[in-house]
Image: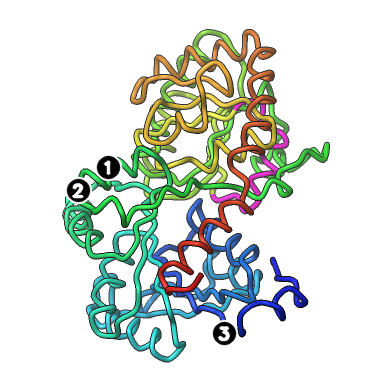
């Protein structure tokens, strides 16, 4: 955690209490947004800001989720906000009550449900509200209805943070005032992503020693992440005679469908779904190629993490991904929803990995220059102070 210099502080303006910020999140998993919340808690200037985490759960859900466990391990104050079900309107009053009880100065929402509740609760107990847009994902009719609602609600937020230029443009297209939108790219704590030479984690993960180069994809197993395209591509690669060990790390609603697809293509010995991996850097240590087959992206943390570990990246040309992967310089980009294009990219890597490794090395340098987490946190501190009317 960053602390200010006490002697410098004593010479400044009279001290004021730190700003209390409540992050709202509706998820069991950590994921990219969750990592950003936790790392911001560690990095932020605690003399100026105190972060709290509010997590939505239904009456039947246990509070021992990966995200809540991680937050408590970090020492972040966690407040479970329970509803009868996912859409219990009483959540609005409970958030307003929590804001009042904790003397919260700013509420920071992080997805559609949090946006709706943050906005409505702020009508009951007025505090500035800010949201981070990671990308609108509409895999179902219900999701698309909520997205339509969210596009209207975010216009009422005091600040809207976009994690990529693409999302910023999409937000402005909804009618948001340009003055309320701030571009703040995702970032990672580079110190956590350094090679150690350790081996054996992958074998313990999949229950066997990998045979052939390791292709990994790390992310939630949800339709918009394009894992079905990747599995189809791996089928084409194996049919061409290439040996490969593929690991699709993550949990999500698509897992049963993907397992059935793996069986149907006869890829049980080549493609593995180990579930959620809490330490992706250990998997990346033994990964030869990272593939991100997404249909949509905000700005992919997985690409940043892979490049930080100097792992070559093959990704689809969607959302904010081209802001991380410059084709031919820091990785390779192909069209989305094309198993054939993914297969050709994987085969090209397997045939000649040397230029890919050069791109990964250049990618590490780029991440160091442009996606440092300390710089990102200083940007967030500025936005919070601006919202509270502090210098």
Q: Position of residue 135 (x, y in %)?
A: 34, 47
Q: Tell which circle, 2 or 3, labels the residue nearer the N-terminal end.
A: 3
Q: Identify the image quadrant of the N terminus.
A: bottom right
Real-space CA distance between mark 2 and mark 3, rounded to the nearest whole angstrom: 38 Å
Q: Is residue 171 above or below residue 64?
A: above
Crowding at dot 1, Cα within 10 Å, few <14 / some 14-19 / many 20+, comes out as some
Q: Is residue 178 above or below residue 383?
A: above
Which residue appears at 58% of the width and 58% of the height? Answer: 378
Q: Position of residue 2 (x, y in %)?
A: 69, 66
Q: Which mark is residue 320?
A: none
Q: Nearer the viewer, residue 207 or 153?
A: 153
Q: Nearer the viewer, residue 286 or 184?
A: 184
Residue 334 image-quadrant placement? top left
Q: What residue is pinned by disc 2? A: 174
Q: What residue is pinned by disc 3? A: 16
Q: In the image, 116: left or right of 131?
A: left
Element under label 3? loop
Q: Position of residue 344 (x, y in %)?
A: 48, 12
Q: Does residue 121 show up magenta in the picture?
A: no
Real-space CA distance between mark 3 and mark 1, rounded to the nearest whole angstrom: 38 Å
Crowding at dot 2, Cα within 10 Å, few <14 / some 14-19 / many 20+, comes out as few
Q: What residue is pinned by disc 1? A: 170
Element under label 1? helix
Q: Residue lying farthest right? A: 197
Q: In the image, 101: left or right of 249?
A: left
Residue numbers of the magenta segment: 276-289
Q: In the image, 165: left or right of 315?
A: left
């Amino acid at each position: 955690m960053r602390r200010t210099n006490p002697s410098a502080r004593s010479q400044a303006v009279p001290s004021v209490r730190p700003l209390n910020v409540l992050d709202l999140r509706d998820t069991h998993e950590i994921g990219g947004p969750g990592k950003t919340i936790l790392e911001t808690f560690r990095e932020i200037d605690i003399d100026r800001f105190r972060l709290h985490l509010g997590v939505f759960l239904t009456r039947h859900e246990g509070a021992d989720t990966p995200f809540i466990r991680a937050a408590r391990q970090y020492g972040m104050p966690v407040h479970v906000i329970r509803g009868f079900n996912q859409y219990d309107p009483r959540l609005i009053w409970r958030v307003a009550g929590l804001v009042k009880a904790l003397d919260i100065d700013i509420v920071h929402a992080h997805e559609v449900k949090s946006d709706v509740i943050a906005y409505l609760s702020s009508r009951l107990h007025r505090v500035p509200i800010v949201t981070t847009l990671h990308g609108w994902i509409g895999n179902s009719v219900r999701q698309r209805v909520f997205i339509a609602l969210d596009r209207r609600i975010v216009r009422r937020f005091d600040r809207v943070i976009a994690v990529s230029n693409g999302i910023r443009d999409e937000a402005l297209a909804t009618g948001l005032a340009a003055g309320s939108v701030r571009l703040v790219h995702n970032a990672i704590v580079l110190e956590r992503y350094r090679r150690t030479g350790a081996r054996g984690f992958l074998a313990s993960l999949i229950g066997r020693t990998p045979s052939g180069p390791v292709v990994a994809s790390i992310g939630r197993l949800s339709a918009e992440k394009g894992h079905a395209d990747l599995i189809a591509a791996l089928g084409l690669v194996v049919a061409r005679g290439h040996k490969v060990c593929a690991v699709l790390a993550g949990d999500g609603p698509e897992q049963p469908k993907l397992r059935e697809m793996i069986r149907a293509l006869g890829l049980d010995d080549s493609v593995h779904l180990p579930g959620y991996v809490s330490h992706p850097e250990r998997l990346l240590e033994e990964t030869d190629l990272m593939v991100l087959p997404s249909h949509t992206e905000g700005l992919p943390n997985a690409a940043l993490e892979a490049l930080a570990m100097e792992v070559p990246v093959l990704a689809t040309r969607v959302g904010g991904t081209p802001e991380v992967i410059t084709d031919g310089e820091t990785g390779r980009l192909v069209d989305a929803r094309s198993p054939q294009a993914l297969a050709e990219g994987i085969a090209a890597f397997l045939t000649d990995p040397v230029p890919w490794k050069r791109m990964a090395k250049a990618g590490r340098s780029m991440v160091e220059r442009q996606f440092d987490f300390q710089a990102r946190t200083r940007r967030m501190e500025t936005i919070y102070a601006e919202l509270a009317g502090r210098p």
